[in-house]
Image: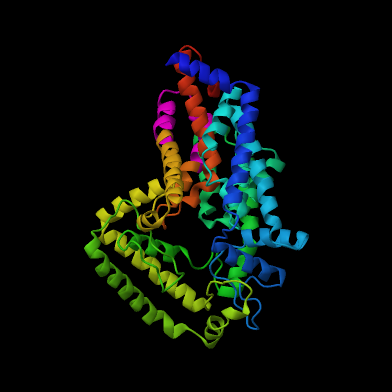
Amino acid sequence: MANVLHWFFQTLERRRTFLLLLVLNALVAVATLWLSRATFLSDGWSYLGLAEGLLHGEYSMWWPLAADYPDTFRAPGYPAFLAFFIKIFSTWKSVYVVNAVLYAVALYLTLGVIERLDPRLSTRSLFLLLLLPLMNVPYYIGQLYTEIPVLAAFSLVLHLIIGRRRWSIGTAVVLGLTLGFVHLCKPIYMLLPLALIGAALIKDRMNFDMRGHALMLGTFVVVLLPYGLWNKRNHGQFKVTPIEGGGGYMHFAYWCGKMPGYTDHFSLGNFTGDEIIRFTPADSVPSHIAAFEREWAFINAQTHPLLTAKDSIMLTSREKLPYVAEPTYNTRFALTRERLLKERAFELMWNDPWYTLAYKSYSALRLWVIGIQRADFAAASIGKKAEMLYATLSTGLLFLLGITQIPLAYFQKVIRLRNTWPLLLLVVYTGLLHVPFTIQSRYTVSVRFAMLGLLSLACAAMWQRRIRPSTPSQTGKH
């Protein structure tokens, strides 16, 4: 075994191997984009609608209508990003090229971070080898989604943090701006700056960089202020996250495991996956669907009286828009429905702890492992079945490798928490904060480079130790 590992890492240490793996990853990205060229995921339309709204002076998907419909559902970071490039290049398709550049930048920065922690070329080659089967990451280059810009932003954050005990004024400001952009793309990362400060405070104690972290946090807050003030002016609440969405996704997430294969016709038209592992007997599904629909009947009874004539105009005006838009109801309606859904979600989970614990444990796994839906798999051709199995096996094997090798590497002290904690923090934060919501493996795409970087460091240190047991960990030198 030692001889095989010696040959393996000797091969990875060659520059020719590293360059070959870079080329292969580029080819995988191109092939993925070619195979998915006809696919345009649904959220892209609402992002595009909001970007067009910004270009026409309104933050709304319904800007062609005479009345104002200020958005309630999405943070403005990514729509502003789209609007910027549409303004420059006169087409939203230019964002695909921008995504490709950002993907390359993210890869470059991540490889630099790995080199800073472990200078051996074999560790960077191992990262590229682990990335090679993950077609779900470059897939988002060809979509109008937040995943690739946030992937690049996180790579920049890691590049600025790792290996630097104290930050210059410029570094702290850039970190605050970048984390502010991340939050305005994905509001779930609102607490990430505080998590970074807390982790750095624990790690450095007396040497904590108070000035740098205070400046980073202050810049982050300044970036969020305009959106909070916009919400105050348009919805009566100073809030730096959208005024609705979280409660609805928590509520729907509870029911997903109880009614597989169901399409919601009350809110956003989401569907529940019919997973390989089921959490309810098949004969109980109709009763769960009936209970879910009774819940919505109760919620609608309290919210529908709040609808206005302007809401009715909006709902009957979809054909006037050049794209599909999500309904944007009046502020009182949106706030009331969000409160009811959130209250009900917490109540349901509290009263059904064993199901909630089991299903949320499965959700935590599925954030990292692409699932297979029963009906889709049964109806698929042999080729499509192979694609589904490949996606599940590739992400599943990497997840298994991660949860075994990374903790073991920390336990055996071949990698050091004091050097690698920002990588670990990103991965753990993302995994934990998304568990209460609906299952979406795309939620972890933006931290896949961080996860694979940490995994490559752990595996390189662990496996090469078996070749030369006396060799000290490279990651312990920084």
Start and end of the magenta stretch? 402-426
List the single residue furthest toward the front. 382
Prevalent SS, magenta region: helix
Residue 241 at least partly seen? no
Note whether 76 is above or below 115 in the view shown.
Answer: below
Determine if the magenta segment contains residue 231: no
Q: Position of residue 193 (x, y in %)?
A: 56, 47
Q: Measured from the top left, where is residue 478 in percent x and y?
A: 58, 24
Q: Position of residue 391 (x, y in %)?
A: 46, 45
Left or right: 298 in relation to 142 = left
- Please tell me which residue lies in front, 252 or 129: 129
Q: Does the magenta stretch include residue 419?
A: yes
**Taking 253 as reference, is 418 left or right?**
right
Q: In which quarter of the image is residue 419?
A: top right
Q: Residue at x 61, y 53 (%)?
A: 142
Which residue shows up at 57% across the image and 33% down it? Answer: 128
**Residue depicted at 52% across the width and 28% down the height:** 457
As displayed, is residue 243 above or below residue 367? Answer: below
Residue 301 point in image, percent of width and height: 37, 82
Quadrant in which the N terminus appears? top left
Q: Which of 331 and 399 is in front in this view?
A: 399
Q: In which quarter of the image is residue 45?
A: bottom right
